[in-house]
């Protein structure tokens, strides 16, 4: 007699676009009975992510939300009703900044394994002290398990909060590249650098420009392409870089974005705060190497999976950054393990094991 499918509920604040394909893959699995519960269709920090979930069972809880700055305070009752209707064997709580998450650890069932999907780490800019840190610690200490992008977040939980639970290292899953995807960077003369992300101070595209200029000083041809939009776009468009061909293409997706990945010799991301940038998994899936700041999470796990990447201290000198970019440019092989189907298999095994431990 086949074993019963593990009933998995995921509680999340908003329908993030980059996890839709993962949930669709999970929903296709015979060993997982998935239901995703969203606290709303949008969030003050991510209103552009207001999308309609498709291809997997989901509930978008509709209620009045109290917004205080960038925080959205959700009531507890309706999310809990949605969770109880699904009767999960395991509950994954994505994030930890919503009061409804505390409800996830309320006295619904002492036997229900609750897993925190946590991306914060020591240097991501997300660490907080005082009351906020004590609340986080109280939350994490009740978890049965954790999903983290890499060592950076694992160490934060274990060293800063003192919590040791079964942990799945899980770089953000991404869809498979197009079957026609072909790396052409090896045919490019010099360095063809790529920056993908919001053009704002937090991502710091201006620093990427300085790194490219440092490379150009060595006498090698250098092109830097910015894919994204934001308040720094006009400044980047007007900047006249020394010996660097700069291109500001705005937001791209589909084939237009794939063309940039195909031509890229290296992704450069000197972010000041980036707990787990999805773009690193996108680069790894395509075999594009990356050089990022140590404020980016998930680098350790991606490198262990075989990605060509390196994290440098944010305050490392421009020549140090340029040297790392020059060393890694053009290297790298595509990594299948970060795509959604194998990632869904890993997550399914993790939650099944937790479910069996809780019985």
Image (cartoon, helix red, strand yellow):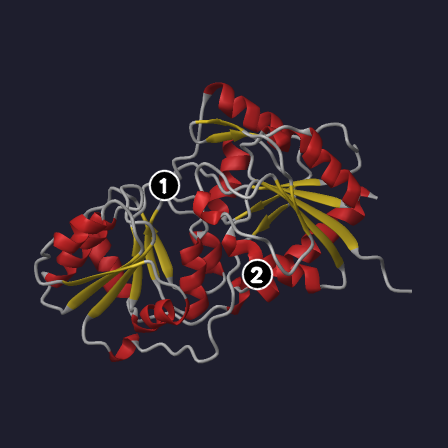
Front position in the image: 267 or 237: 237
Look at the image and tell me whether residue 137 can be seen.
Answer: yes
Q: Quadrant of residue 91?
A: top right
Kindly identify the residue that appears in the image at 80 percent across and 49 percent down.
356
Q: Quadrant of residue 252?
A: bottom left
Identify the mark at residue 21; answer none if there is no mark.
2
- 272, above or below 128, in the image: below
Residue underneath mark 1 = 273
Quadrant (top left/top right/bottom left/bottom right) for the C terminus: top right
Kindly identify the residue that appears in the image at 54 percent across and 41 percent down.
118
Q: Position of residue 278 (x, y in %)?
A: 44, 54
Quadrant (top left/top right/bottom left/bottom right) for the N terminus: bottom right
In the displayed image of the protein, which residue is found farthest to the top?
131
Front position in the image: 262 or 119: 262
Mark 1 crowdedness (10 Å alpha carbons): few <14, some 14-19, many ≥20: many
Please report contact status of discs 2 and 1: CB closer than 8 Å, yes or no. no
Q: Position of residue 341 (x, y in %)?
A: 60, 66
- Whichever of callouts 2 and 1 sits on the residue coming sooner in the sequence is 2
Q: Position of residue 148 (x, y in %)?
A: 54, 46
CA distance separating discs 2 and 1: 25 Å
Disc 2, SS: helix
Kindly identify the residue that appears in the image at 24 percent across and 50 percent down.
205
């Amino acid at each position: 007699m086949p074993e019963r499918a593990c009933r998995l509920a995921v509680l999340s604040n908003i329908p993030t676009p980059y996890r839709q394909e993962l949930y669709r893959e999970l929903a296709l699995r015979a060993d997982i009975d998935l239901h995703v519960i969203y606290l709303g269709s949008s969030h003050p920090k991510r209103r552009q992510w207001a999308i309609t979930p498709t291809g997997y069972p989901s509930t978008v809880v509709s209620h009045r939300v109290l917004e205080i700055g960038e925080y959205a305070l959700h009531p507890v009752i309706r999310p809990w009703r949605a969770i109880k209707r699904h009767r999960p064997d395991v509950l994954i709580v994505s994030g930890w900044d919503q009061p409804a998450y505390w409800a996830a650890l309320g006295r619904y069932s002492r036997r229900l394994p609750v897993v925190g999907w946590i991306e914060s780490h020591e240097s991501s800019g997300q660490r907080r002290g005082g009351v906020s840190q004590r609340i986080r610690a109280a939350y994490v200490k009740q978890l049965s398990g954790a999903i983290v992008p890499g060592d950076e977040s694992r160490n934060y939980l274990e060293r800063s909060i003192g919590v040791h639970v079964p942990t799945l290292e899980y770089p953000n899953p991404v869809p498979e590249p197009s079957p026609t995807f072909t790396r052409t960077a090896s045919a490019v003369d010099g360095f063809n650098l790529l920056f993908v992300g919001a053009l704002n101070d937090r991502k710091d595209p201006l620093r990427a420009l300085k790194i490219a200029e440092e490379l150009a000083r060595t006498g090698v041809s250098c092109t830097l392409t910015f894919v994204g939009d934001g308040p720094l776009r006009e400044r980047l468009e007007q900047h006249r870089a020394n010996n660097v061909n700069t291109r500001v293409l705005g937001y791209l997706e589909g084939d237009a974005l794939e063309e940039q990945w195909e031509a890229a010799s290296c992704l450069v991301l000197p972010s000041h705060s980036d707990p787990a940038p999805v773009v690193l998994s996108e680069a790894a899936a395509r075999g594009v190497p990356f050089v990022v700041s140590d404020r980016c999470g998930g680098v350790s796990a991606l490198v262990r999976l075989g990605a060509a990447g390196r994290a440098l201290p944010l305050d490392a000198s421009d020549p140090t950054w340029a040297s790392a970019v020059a060393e890694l440019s053009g290297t790298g092989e595509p990594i299948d393990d970060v795509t959604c189907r194998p990632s869904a298999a890993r997550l399914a095994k993790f939650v099944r094991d937790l479910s069996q431990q809780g019985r």
